[in-house]
Structure formats: C-alpha cells, structure tokens
Image (cartoon, coloured by chain):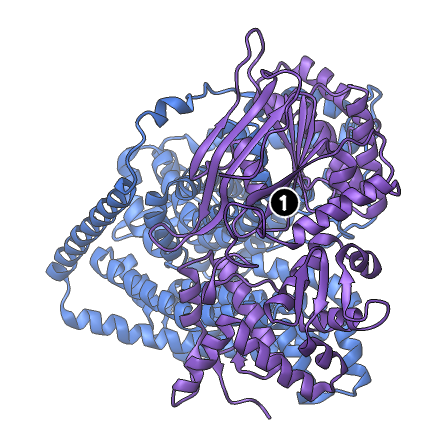
C-alpha cells in the first residue's frame, strides 16, 4: 500500500539540518520516550524468542487479553526480522542480476516466477528444515515462521531494486564514472538513493502481504508436528479452534492497532524521508508528511544524541574499500568473441541444470503420484480459475463506478484513499471466521459462498487504484467533456475508462495475484470442529499440507504457478502494454 | 588526411591532450555501422578555450566523452603527454543536463568528486566551500538541487567540476538547457573567472551548437561536419575579451562559420561526405521535423523580404531559431528537393515556390511526389505496399531493416519521421495498434 496523504505546508527551510542548537525543545522528551520504549520492546521480544522449545509446552498460548500485547510484539518483531532478511536478499541478488548478464539470465525469470508462486506452499518444506537446524529451541520454529514471511516479501522488493538499477539516468552514471567512484561509493551515493522510493513502496506492499502469512505461519501444523508460536496468528487460530468469537474480535482489533502503529511510527516517517530521493529536478506540490518525522526533525537534543546512533549510515558512506586497479584486469582482456562463447557455455550450463532439476522433480513426483493426480490438480485449478475470474469481474463491476465517483471528487478522495489503502493492508484471513460462522448458520453451499473470501482482502487494490486514476484525469479533459456535453456511456467510453485503465490494470493484476494466493486459505476454512471446503486448487494444497503429503503440495504449487503465470502472460501483460502504449497521458 | 592543421603556438611542449586519428562506430557488431567520428585530430594546449562546433549527431559529444574517458573510441589515440615535474593531466566535466544528485545538497554534490578521491573530510569541506564561494553559490550550501533555478544548478555543476582541480575543464553544451538571459550571465561569469585566472584549470574544451556562443567564448573553434563527424574547419578567434556581439568583426566571423556549416564536406578537399544525414539510401537517419515546420519555412522564405532566397544567419535571426534548430529543417527541405543550400544561403526550388502558393490538396500532392521520389525509405515502403496484394506490410519489417544499420533509437526516430511525412502526403497509412503500414487511405 502507499501512503500519500500529503502535508503541503511542510515546506523545508534550507538550513534546518545545519543549525543544531543545544537548547531542548518540547519535542525532545516525547521523542526520547518513544525511542527508549521501542528499544526496550525489541530487547524483550528477542529474549523471548531464544527460549527453549519446552517453554512453549509449559506456557502454551492462551486467550488471556493481558498476554495480547506481548503476542503482538513478537508477531511484529517477526515481521521486521523477515523484512530485514528480504532487504539483505534484495541488495545482494538484485545487484548481482543488474551487474552480471549471466546472473541476470537466471535471476530475473526466477524472480518473476517466485513473485507469482503461492508462498503458503513453501511452509511445509521449511519447517522441518529449520527445526532440524536448531533442535530443541524455539529459534528453529521462529526461523521457519520468519522464513515463511520472507518468502512472501522478498521477490517484489528484489524486482523493484533490479529495475531501478537498470534505469539509472545516464548522466548520473557518467558523473560517477568520470569521478571514478568505487563500486561501493557508487552503491551508496547513486544506486541505493535512486532505488529508494520504489523500494520503500514495495517494502510497504510486502508488509501487507506478510501480515496475511504471519497468521498462517505462527500456528504451523505439518503432518503430526504442531508448533504454536506466541503471536497474534496463534491467538487467532486458537480462538477459531475454540469457536470463541469474542477472542477473534479482540485479536482482529489488536492486529488493526499494530498495523496503525507501524504505519504511523515506521512507514510514514520513512515515506516522508524517502521523498528526498525522488528523482525529479523540480519540487513537487505535495510532499508526504509524517508527524513523527517532523517531531524528530524538530528535536534538538535528540538529534545531538542520535548523531552517534547514525554512525552505521555515516560509516557506510565513509568506507573506502581498497580499489582494484583496472589495469590489472585489462591485461587479461579476452579476445573479442570469447564473451559470446562464455555466454553460450553459461546458457548450456543453466539449461543442463534445468534438465537435471526436471528429472529430479519427475522422479520424485512420479514415484508418489499417478497421472490422474495431475489431471485432478489441473481440474481443480480450472475451478479456482473460474472463481478468480468471476470475483475479479464482480469486484470490478462494484468498485470501478464507486472508485470513479470518489476519485472525481477530490474532497472525498483525500479522505477515503487512506482507508482503502489500510483495508488493502489488512490481512483479510482474520475475518474468515465470521464468514464461516455465517455459512454454517445459514447452511449455504461452501463451493459458492467460500469464494468471496478470496477477494475480501484484494478487492481494495482495485478500489484505491481506480480512485488514484480518476483523480489523475486532467481537469482540461474533464472540462472539454463537460463543454461538449458528454454523458453516460459515451463519457465512460471516451473519458472515464481510458483515464483509469492503466491504474485499473495495476490494481486488478495485484488483486488477481493476491486472490490466487488467498485461495490456499480461503477454500478450506475451519471453525472449531466444523470444516468447510470448496473444490479448488487452494483446498487441494491446504489439505496436502495438513496431511504432510509433500508430493501433492509440490504438485499443487507447481500447477498453481503455471496457472498464475499463464493468466498474467495471457491477460494482464497485454493489457498493461496496451495501456502503456495508447493510454498514457503525457 | 584531414584538413585541420594545428595552429602554431609559442611553445611546442605545452600540449595537454593529443587526439590522433580517432574513429568511432556505433551499431551492431557485424552489421553495418554508423560512423560518428572519422579520423579526428585535435590538440589542446595550455591556456586556451577550444570549441567543438557542429550540429547534433556530428560526434562532438562523442569526442568529448572519449577525452573524458567515458567512451573508448573504436580506433585512434588519445594521449595526455606527461611533462617533467608536473602532475599528470586530469579532466573534469560539466554536463548539459547538470547531472546533479537530487538527494544530495549543493555542498554534498560539490564534495562528491573529492570524496571519490578519498580526500579527508576537513579538507574536503574547505575546498568545496572555496569552490562554492568562487562560483557564486554562497548561501545555497544546504539547498537541494530541486530548490534551485537552472542557472544555479549549472553553477553547482561547475563548482563540482572545478573543485577536483582538473587541468582541463570539459563542457558538454553547458548553457543550452538554460534560458537566454541566464546562459549569458553564466558565460560572462565563467569568462571573467577564466580571464582573471581564478580557476585552477589550464584549458577548457567545450561542445556547442551555438555559433555565437563559440565565437564569444573560444580562442579556437573546430567546425564539425556531420555524417560522419569530421573536423572540416578550424577558426582562430583573435578578438580581444570581452567580445561584443555587435562588433562587425564578430559578425563577420559568425557569418563565415555559417557558410562553412551549410556546405557539409563540400570543397573541403579530402573526402566528400556521403549525404545530408547519417547513413545512405534507405538506411538514412531522418530527423523528426514536422510538416508544419517545413511548410512554415517554405512560406517564410517565399515571402518578403526573402523572396525565395534567404541568407541563413538572417533567416535564423528573423525566425528566432538557433543554427542547430534551423539546419535540420533546411536540410530536410534540401532532401525533398524543395531547397538548395549553398554558401550560407537557402534558395527555394521552383517546386517549393509552387507549393507556397498552392491550396491544401495541391500541396499534399506535391509533397507526396517529392517524398516518394527523394526520400528513399518512403519510396521503398510505398513500393513494398504496391507489390503486395493485401497492400499491407508490418512496420517491424522495416524497423528490423533499419536496425541493421543504425541504433534502435535512430530506427524508431527515422520510422516516425517517415510515417508522419507519409501521413501528411497521404502516400501511405500506418495503423499504430497493429503496427502495420497500409495503402488504404481513410478517404
């Protein structure tokens, strides 16, 4: 999600950062308290995490509201640890892809596929691995949960970083080459700042995605191993198992509070700060604001105190790695043409590895599965496909007119846009129990009525993108349409739809990808002892996971990946290209 | 080989850069290449400002970037002679687009080069502040580039280039992104600093397409032809600084350079240039000039006071065009045989004079005749469409043909130019959605 509600009055005087006085301002004590509290909370959470696994059995997760803040803390900590891991992954892998053409050949398609793979499927494989890595300690299970969140966060961040690195403006590239920047200086001075705005956006998207999986990954059941880590996710699954509607509501409320808190305390300041990295030479009218960012910038003592704390950043920028003289490499310059031969060899090597991989996969699956399983998986995939298509169409029919109505009224758009973004970030799976209770109570057909759960969380992407598109329709176009008396269908055909189309495609692409992922949790839901299931690929994967049937999980994940990729390539990509080519207002 | 003969100076050993026989090709390996620089020689000496003057695409920026070490030319030598007891020659560059880091303040932007050279923070700060002071940026140290006007941004670019104490300052059209008044102020300020010897540099090499700017600032001007880029003339400017644009000697110099630039490669001894635009025949790189502009120029020259024949400097002044903007239009007219360029004059052909007087439909017919007869690519596309029963041909086919001999950017530009001309002439149509050329006109 993106937070853009601006604060246009926050114009910066030039030299505010240079004038650091020593007289404390009113903002100092507040900021100091916030900082100290944050530090203590992190230490507490980390202490808990390294405890022995036996503690989990002696103090199991309870539905005691007094414990809820602690659970929320541990869940949040997991989220941010996963985010840290995703950032490390991003900086290494994406940089490698951008710098080396050979690595690029492999990494870019891999990222593209991983972006659209149902990450919940990974969970099964990793839990066993990490528990074996730290036997008898909670850390192993924690790692598995964090890794599950990581797999939902890392890919789009890496992709965004890679794309930024590939689109560095040529004049800045020339400046850094002309001054002979070392690779490290190039990274901290040019590449990282240039990529920051896109990366921050994707970090926020990833956090929303991560919440969805934290609920699923804290209470892990693989075959006959069940581990429940203290956290909001476990709280919710326990509440669901006990059919305790009040506890579910409390858990949902706690999650909402946490999301609002990290939005206000972490992302808004970061977005406000990252604004300075936006690559533009003219000041934009509206800049994102954050009360916390302004608070920190207003404090005097805190900045003096914080100066030593910023040493990692300063040190990072000041590191002078020994440079490797160019000449030494030049002497070993290979004759022209060798490069192409090496490329060929590399492609052959990758293709060979691919074949080996295919063989391994085949021998693993063919020993455990029959051809009929493949057919079943594809059949169920079609069922889920129908659901996704119908639901996206329904969501479009509902939200496009509403979004257009809101977007054309700036006063409403300003107020409703942040709400739509919040709803998109909110993990919809925590709302499932309410729906299940309703289905059970009214004896509805799960095949039909479980389906809406798939778009419960993802429909908001369509809404907020349409709002953004409608507000971006230039006022001269609206005025021209008004003067020529365009109304009704003609207005939609010639002004409305072309105006929002590129935005809509972005929203619908995100929504459909999210819906496929959500099908794993939405097609098979449990409420106490009642188990509801819809026929679909999501339910197939969920059942196989619960049974610890690795072969079927792998099959299900593979088939779903194929569906998602085919769907993207066949529908969304062409629409995206069309929008880029024909409907760009420039 | 080349016509350029070095101008003798007092000492022989004060050479800063020696460029010999530099050639540079752009294009696919193996395919036909676009020659942008052909056998260029250049010697830069102490205490001179040398201008590289030419149209866009004459390879002058490529030469500058080769000297800056940003491009390795396909062949030839670029030498920085080492003089006894002196530090090796260093270069620094000022960019047309300023190329400032938007996330760094003015001070940080200026310090960037020193930081890369691992100068200690204290000294870095001291030297950066001195450069900022020198270039007139006091008080802006903590501002971000987006808060500054274009002129102030280019001052940051200058300070950043000067702070590393280069022997040679390279400038790539440093004032062309600025408005007229700002550009003039910056030029004057820079010349003042240079004449008073307050900059640590030994020489300036600047790329420009503005003839007056070159005459105003440079001690020596190398005139480049385009297609391919060659030095076709060296002009020594002996006028004392500060120079006056209205001085008759100044004007005469400007006029003579205009004349040199309107006869690309002709009568310059040596070799003949292949044509007006890079590439030959079907694979000629065409400029994107609107048919409205072409019609406007024909009308302007046809009417009073020119009556069919205009002196280019007068025309440029009358229409408020810079030489670089006027040349592609005039040359497109020449390509279409609507005009002849000779000795700094543009003379309309009888066809063009008829065009000027004709109504819309006759104009279109006339334009179509000339387009199909004289622009090889247009004729080629039309022939392919005529031959096919369906009268359709995918544009990708022609794009691929073009990309064999030019960069994808040039191919796209050329195809767009020919498409818009053909649409106006109703010679053939283009369906953007299907990316197909067709003959069926909507009429």
Residue at the bottom extreme, as displayed: B443
Residue B331 or A556: which is nearer the viewer? B331
Is residue A435 visible from the viewing direction of this image?
no
Q: Residues within 10 Å of mark 1 (few under 14, many from 20)?
A: many
Residue under label 1: A267
Q: Which residue does the image show at 49% across and 71% down from the upper left?
A: B376
Q: Quadrant of residue A25?
A: top right
> The chain drawn blue is chain what?
A
Q: Which residue does the image show at 63% across and 69% down from the upper left?
A: A466
Q: Position of residue A87 (x, y in %)?
A: 48, 40
> Residue A564 vs residue B284: left or right?
left
> Residue A160 vs residue B164: left or right?
left
Q: Position of residue A305 (x, y in %)?
A: 70, 21
Q: Which residue does the image show at 51% across and 89% down from the upper left?
A: B440
> Residue B320 vs residue B286: left or right?
right
Q: Quadrant of residue B362?
A: bottom right
Residue A510 or A133: which is nearer the viewer? A510
> The chain drawn purple is chain what?
B
Is residue B77 visible from the viewing direction of this image?
yes
Write down the chain letter for disc 1: A
Q: Position of residue A586 (x, y in %)?
A: 67, 65
């Amino acid at each position: 999600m993106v937070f853009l509600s601006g604060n246009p009055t926050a114009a910066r005087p030039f030299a505010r950062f240079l004038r650091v006085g020593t007289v404390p301002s009113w903002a100092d004590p507040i900021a100091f308290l916030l900082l100290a509290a944050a530090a203590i909370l992190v230490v507490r959470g980390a202490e808990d995490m390294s405890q022995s696994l036996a503690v989990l059995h002696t103090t199991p997760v309870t539905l005691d509201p007094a414990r809820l803040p602690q659970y929320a803390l541990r869940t949040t900590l997991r989220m941010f640890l996963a985010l840290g891991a995703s950032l490390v992954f991003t900086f290494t892998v994406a940089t490698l892809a951008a710098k080396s053409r050979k690595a690029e050949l492999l990494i870019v398609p891999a990222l593209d596929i991983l972006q659209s793979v149902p990450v919940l499927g990974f969970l099964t494989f990793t839990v066993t691995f990490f528990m074996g890595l730290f036997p008898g300690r909670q850390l192993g299970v924690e790692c598995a949960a964090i890794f599950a969140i990581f797999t939902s966060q890392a890919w789009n961040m890496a992709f965004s970083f890679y794309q930024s690195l590939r689109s560095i403006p040529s004049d800045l590239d020339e400046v850094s080459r002309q001054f002979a920047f070392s690779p490290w200086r190039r990274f901290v001075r040019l590449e990282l700042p240039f990529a920051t705005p896109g990366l921050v956006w994707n970090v926020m998207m990833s956090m929303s995605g991560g919440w969805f999986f934290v609920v699923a990954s804290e209470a892990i059941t693989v075959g006959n191993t069940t581990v429940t880590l203290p956290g909001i996710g476990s709280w919710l699954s326990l509440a669901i198992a006990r059919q305790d509607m009040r506890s579910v509501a409390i858990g949902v409320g706690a999650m909402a509070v946490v999301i609002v808190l990290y939005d206000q305390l972490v992302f808004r300041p970061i977005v406000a700060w990252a604004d300075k990295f936006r690559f533009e030479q003219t000041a934009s009218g509206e800049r994102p604001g954050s009360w916390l960012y302004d608070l920190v910038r207003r404090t005097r003592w805190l900045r003096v105190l914080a100066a030593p704390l910023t040493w990692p950043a300063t040190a990072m920028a000041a590191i002078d790695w020994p440079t490797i003289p160019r000449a030494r490499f030049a002497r070993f310059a290979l004759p022209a043409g060798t490069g192409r031969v090496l490329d060929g060899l590399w492609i052959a090597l990758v293709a060979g590895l691919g074949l080996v991989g295919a063989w391994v996969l085949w021998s693993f699956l063919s020993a455990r599965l029959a051809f009929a399983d493949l057919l079943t998986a594809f059949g169920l995939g079609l069922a889920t496909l129908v659901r996704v298509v119908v639901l996206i169409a329904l969501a479009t029919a509902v939200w496009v007119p509403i979004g257009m109505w809101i977007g054309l009224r700036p006063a409403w758009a300003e107020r409703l846009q942040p709400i739509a973004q919040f709803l998109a970030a909110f993990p919809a799976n925590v709302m499932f129990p309410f729906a299940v209770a309703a289905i059970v109570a009214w004896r509805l057909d799960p095949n039909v009525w479980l389906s809406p759960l798939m778009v419960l969380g993802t429909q908001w992407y369509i809404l907020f993108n349409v709002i953004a598109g409608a507000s971006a329709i230039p006022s001269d176009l609206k005025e021209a349409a008004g003067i020529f008396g365009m109304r009704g269908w003609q207005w939609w055909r010639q002004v409305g739809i072309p105006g929002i189309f590129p935005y809509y495609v972005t929203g619908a692409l995100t929504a459909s990808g999210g819906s496929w992922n959500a099908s794993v949790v939405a097609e098979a839901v449990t409420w106490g002892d009642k188990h509801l299931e819809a026929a679909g690929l999501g339910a197939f994967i969920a059942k196989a996971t619960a049974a610890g049937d690795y072969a079927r999980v792998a099959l299900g994940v593979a088939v779903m990946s194929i569906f998602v990729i085919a769907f993207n390539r066949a529908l969304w990509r062409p629409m995206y290209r069309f929008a880029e080519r024909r409907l760009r207002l420039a | 080989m080349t016509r350029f003969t070095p101008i003798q100076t007092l000492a022989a050993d004060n050479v800063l850069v020696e460029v010999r026989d530099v050639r540079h090709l752009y294009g696919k390996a193996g395919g036909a290449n676009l020659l942008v620089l052909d056998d260029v020689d250049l010697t830069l000496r102490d205490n001179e400002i040398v201008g590289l003057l030419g149209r866009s695409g004459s390879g002058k920026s490529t030469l500058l970037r080769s000297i800056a070490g940003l491009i390795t030319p396909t062949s030839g030598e670029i030498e920085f002679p080492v003089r006894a007891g002196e530090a090796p020659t260093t270069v620094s560059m000022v960019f047309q687009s300023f190329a400032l880091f938007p996330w760094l303040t003015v001070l940080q932007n200026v310090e960037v080069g020193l930081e890369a050279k691992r100068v200690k923070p204290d000294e870095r700060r001291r030297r950066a502040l001195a450069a900022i002071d020198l270039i007139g940026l006091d008080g802006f140290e903590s501002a971000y580039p987006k808060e500054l006007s274009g002129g102030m941004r280019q001052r940051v670019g200058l300070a950043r280039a000067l702070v590393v104490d280069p022997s040679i300052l390279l400038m790539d059209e440093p004032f062309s992104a600025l408005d007229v008044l700002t550009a003039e102020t910056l030029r004057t300020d820079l010349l003042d600093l240079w004449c008073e010897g307050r900059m640590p540099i030994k020489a300036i090499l600047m790329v420009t397409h503005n003839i007056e700017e070159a005459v105003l600032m440079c001690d020596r001007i190398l005139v480049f032809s385009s297609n391919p880029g060659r030095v076709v003339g060296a002009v020594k400017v002996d006028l004392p600084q500060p120079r006056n644009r209205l001085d008759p000697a100044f004007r005469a110099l400007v006029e003579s350079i205009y004349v040199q630039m309107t006869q690309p490669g002709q009568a310059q001894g040596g070799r003949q240039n292949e044509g007006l635009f890079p590439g030959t025949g079907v694979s000629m790189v065409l400029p994107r000039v609107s048919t409205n502009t072409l019609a406007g120029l024909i009308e302007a020259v046809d009417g009073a006071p020119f009556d069919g024949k205009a002196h280019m400097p007068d025309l440029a002044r009358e229409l408020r065009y810079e030489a670089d903007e006027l040349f592609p239009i005039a040359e497109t007219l020449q390509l279409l045989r609507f005009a002849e360029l000779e000795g700094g004059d543009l003379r309309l052909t009888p066809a063009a004079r008829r065009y000027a007087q004709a109504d819309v439909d006759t104009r279109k017919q006339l334009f179509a005749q000339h387009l199909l007869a004289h622009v090889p690519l247009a004729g080629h596309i039309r022939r392919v469409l005529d031959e096919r029963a369906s009268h359709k041909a995918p544009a990708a086919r022609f794009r691929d043909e073009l990309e064999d001999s030019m960069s994808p950017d040039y191919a796209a530009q050329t195809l767009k130019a020919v498409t818009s001309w053909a649409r106006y002439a109703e010679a053939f149509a283009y369906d953007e959605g299907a990316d197909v050329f067709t003959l069926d006109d909507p009429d």
